[in-house]
Amino acid sequence: MADTAAGSALPPPVPLNVSRTTWPRGLVFHRVHLDLYGATEFNPGIKGNARFSPIRNSAGEAIPTLYGGDSFACAAMESVFHDVPFTPGFKAYDKARLAGQLHARLQADASLVLADLGSKALRKLGIARKRLIDTEKDQYPATRRWAEAIHAQCPDVQGLCWTSRQDDSARALVLFGDRVDPGLLRQAGASRSLAGDAACYGALLDLAEQIGVDIVPGAR
């Protein structure tokens, strides 16, 4: 029976009715990441608490992951501003939290096969968006099980793609590092410091204004 009720994420069924989509060869996507990693370097997938990472394969080994979005705004909303609360008025954001964070533009030299987690495809999977994409952090352990199940049941799938919860005008994606050949991703242009590059910081300030955030030194 298809899931329509609100609440916690459901466990993934076996088998999964996964729809595929492709990220076309050469199409740019945006990544915001710590300077601990190179622009095309995958997070090793050992630490963290995100919707679809860290995850493990069927042998219990960590799956490296790399998140992105189809715009700078999406990448920033899915990272820097991910935890900004839905409260009225302006919220203070400590500028120091931007230290060591970079923006990179990436593209793949071949089309990427991704599991489609858009609204129509989720109906085929039998789970409502509000129980997978729109859940709160307390449900992340359960939503990560879906990523692991898709990885295990769909050996051709190289990652996931969905309409961003943080920016519903954009698509977000996460790639599985063990399914993307080394060298397949390349950087388009130089990385930009979120706080140190004037144009990048200006774009971030514009986005902050849209969501009611004041970026100020020393905010708590």
Image (cartoon, grey):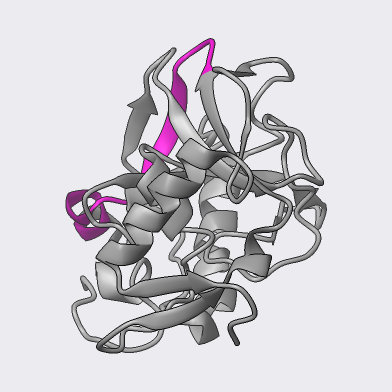
Nearer-the-camera pick, 178 or 103:
103
Residue 144 in picture, x, y percent from top left: 56, 65
Q: Residue at x 82, y 52 (%)?
A: 61
- The reply to whether the magenta stretch includes residue 162 is no
Q: Quadrant of the N terminus?
A: bottom left
Q: Is residue 114 magenta?
A: yes
Q: Which residues are magenta?
A: 108-123
Residue occupying the point 50% across, 48% down:
201
Nearer to the camera, 183 or 22: 183
* Relative to 197, 206 lies left or right: left
Can residue 15 be seen in the rendering of this structure? Answer: no
* Residue at the image point whose x is 78% and y is 41% from the top: 37
Q: Residue 121, how many percent across, how many down?
A: 24, 49
- 194 left or right of 206 in image: right
Q: Position of residue 53 (x, y in %)?
A: 63, 60
Decide: is 144 above or below 102.
below
Task: Give the residue at x 39% y 19%.
Answer: 27
